[in-house]
């Protein structure tokens, strides 16, 4: 079963699970209503095999964040199990903080660590900047929530600072996760990071944030969300487990420029906006309209604007550098192509596209045996018979076509490692590394048969005379001139005996 099919089946089963629950809830069917907490455990348990599949899909160095997220899911499942056992089986209503919150806090810490490890895999993201952005977001929103939500509740009879932290820890961890994902998706050249994995991961953490806020509203205002949202507590980890099942080499999702720029600036402006919100909140709360406070607020505003302008200038500078780098890379690519063309033109005969005489001479040196090994080297010289008559009778254009046709026949007869070249005029050469006399004879015979059966050769009444030779060489007695001399003598004999034949020395 393919990975795509596995994901589709997992999503279908989860939707079926939610549908069954809400049908039971709507129709007031037992045990859906009485055991809604326990029913919610099914969705959490479904995530674990999906994490197991997702972890195995990644390379060893990419598995750690997904292992940590799976560990967080296990901790969350234990906390939910204790909660369901206490309320559904024992009938004990749990008021926070409780032992369940130990597992919930552990889950939040592990998820935050997993996000940091995940961000560390991207070299273009600065973890120090990410930490500061998260810290500013968490402290600013935490301060606003504490001042305007938690502190009034404490004054209305809630039990001390422990209860305040109980209300605050989940939203603050969720804010850290969401701000970290904003950095991941929109912090740098984000086209690199807008992948299905990252977008689905963002949906999972965002859903975690929404559910925690609903729980906070339920605890503060006494709105009974329990039965409605109980199975949805598993949804964030289900979404995250689906994200783990995407391959690391997934394609990048491209966005048009009119959408990506505002999102980048949103990520840059968010910490400064939150900091200014704290300053304004302090002024409103304590009615601080003294000149010193106003000056301090203006200083914070000016420093924020200055820092934002520096960040935007740096971004524009990096964009300029990136464009210049792209231009330079394109110029280097063109230069590389030009160098290859120059090298090709200096080594290849323009008419036949075989090696020219200069390249053949260089090849002689490269074929010299290495060390004390004795190696065979074969050589074939090919001459086009009556070629001058073709030029005189039909013109040089037809003569050029004959030479091109002969070069094609030589390529067809040669082995893949043989080196063919135009030796001059109507004479060709074929170097045969490791070829003894038998191999030289076989290739010569194959070439001659191809020429005899070629319609163009018969039409213009031309043929091939072929002379071949083969010698065994060591490095200290390597003598290419002797090999050439013997092949030339064999070619001369082939012409003397009537042409249209081959002779091997």
Image: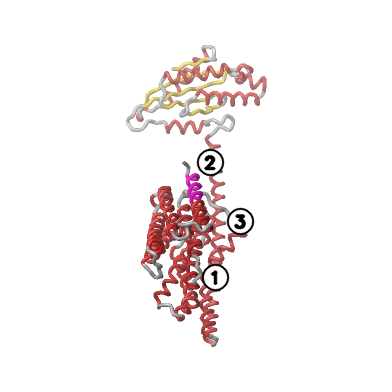
- C-alpha distance separating marks 2 and 3: 37 Å
Q: Secondary structure at mark 1?
A: helix
Q: Is residue 385 left or right of residue 485?
A: right
For disc 1, the marked residue is: 308
In this view, the residue farthest toward the top is 497
The part of the image, by quadrant, that contains residue 34 is: bottom left
Observer-side mark, 2 or 3, equals 3
Image position, residue 167 (x, y; %): 44, 71
Residue pictured at 57% horizontal, 53% vertical: 254
In the picture, which quadrant includes the C terminus?
A: top left
Residue pictured at 54% horizontal, 12% vertical: 498
| Mark 2, other Cα within 10 Å: few <14 / some 14–19 / many ≥20 | few
**Is residue 379 visible in the rendered structure shown here?**
yes
Mark 1 and mark 3 lie on one chain; the one further toward the N terminus is 3
In this view, the residue farthest toward the right is 394
* Dominant SS type (magenta): helix
Residue 256 is marked as 3
Against 137, is 428 above or below? above
Mark 1 and mark 2 lie on one chain; the one further toward the N terminus is 1
Residue 5 within the magenta-colored segment of the rendering: yes
Contact check, label 1 and label 3, Cβ < 8 Å: no
Mark 2 and mark 3 lie on one chain; the one further toward the N terminus is 3
Q: Nearer the viewer, residue 15 or 307?
A: 15
Q: Is residue 311 left or right of residue 45?
A: right
Residue 107 within the magenta-colored segment of the rendering: no
The stretch of residues the image draws in magenta is 3-13
Q: Nearer the viewer, residue 366 or 69?
A: 69
Image position, residue 106 (x, y; %): 38, 64
| Mark 1, other Cα within 10 Å: few <14 / some 14–19 / many ≥20 | some
Residue pictured at 53% horizontal, 74% vertical: 304
Residue 340 is marked as 2
């Amino acid at each position: 079963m393919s990975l795509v099919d596995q994901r589709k089946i997992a999503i279908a089963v989860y939707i079926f699970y939610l549908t069954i629950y809400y049908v039971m809830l709507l129709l007031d069917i037992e045990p859906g209503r009485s055991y809604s907490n326990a029913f919610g455990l099914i969705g959490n348990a479904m995530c674990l095999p999906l994490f197991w599949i997702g972890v195995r899909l990644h390379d060893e160095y990419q598995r750690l964040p997904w292992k940590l997220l799976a560990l967080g899911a296990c901790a969350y499942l234990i906390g939910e199990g204790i909660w369901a056992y206490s309320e559904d089986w024992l009938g004990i209503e749990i008021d926070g903080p409780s032992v369940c919150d130990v597992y919930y806090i552990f889950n939040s810490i592990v998820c935050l660590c997993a996000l940091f490890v995940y961000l560390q895999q991207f070299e273009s993201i600065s973890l120090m900047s990410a930490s500061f952005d998260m810290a500013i977001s968490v402290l600013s929103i935490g301060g606003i929530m504490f001042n305007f939500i938690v502190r009034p509740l404490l004054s209305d009879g809630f039990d001390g600072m422990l209860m305040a932290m109980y209300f605050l820890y989940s939203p603050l961890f969720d804010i850290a996760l969401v701000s970290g994902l904003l950095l991941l998706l929109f912090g740098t050249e984000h086209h690199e990071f807008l992948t299905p994995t990252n977008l689905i991961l963002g949906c999972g953490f965002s859903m975690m944030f929404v559910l925690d806020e609903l729980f906070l509203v339920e605890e503060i205002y006494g709105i009974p969300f329990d039965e409605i949202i109980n199975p949805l507590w598993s949804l964030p980890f289900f979404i995250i487990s689906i994200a783990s099942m995407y391959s690391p080499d997934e394609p990048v999702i491209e966005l048009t420029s009119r959408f990506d720029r505002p999102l980048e600036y949103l990520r840059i402006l968010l910490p400064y906006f939150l900091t200014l919100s704290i300053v304004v909140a302090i002024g409103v709360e304590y009615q601080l309209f003294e000149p010193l406070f106003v000056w301090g607020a203006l200083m914070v505003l000016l420093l924020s604007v200055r820092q934002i302008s520096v960040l935007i200038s740096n971004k524009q500078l990096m964009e300029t550098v990136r464009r210049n780098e792209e231009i330079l890379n394109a110029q280097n690519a063109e230069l590389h192509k030009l160098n290859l063309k120059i090298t090709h033109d200096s080594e290849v005969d323009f008419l036949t596209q075989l090696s020219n005489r200069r390249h053949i001479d260089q090849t002689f040196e490269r074929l010299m045996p290495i060390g004390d090994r004795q190696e065979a080297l074969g050589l074939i010289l090919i001459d086009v018979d009556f070629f001058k008559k073709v030029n005189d009778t039909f013109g040089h254009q037809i003569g050029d076509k004959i030479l091109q046709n002969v070069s094609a026949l030589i390529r067809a007869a040669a082995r893949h490692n043989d080196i063919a070249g135009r030796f001059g005029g109507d004479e060709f050469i074929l170097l045969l590394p490791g070829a003894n006399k038998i191999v030289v004879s076989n290739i010569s015979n194959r070439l001659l048969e191809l020429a005899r059966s070629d319609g163009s050769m018969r039409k213009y009444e031309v043929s091939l005379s072929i002379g071949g030779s083969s010698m065994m060489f060591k490095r200290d007695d390597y003598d290419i001139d002797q090999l050439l001399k013997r092949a030339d003598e064999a070619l001369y004999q082939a012409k003397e005996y009537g042409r249209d034949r081959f002779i091997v020395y």
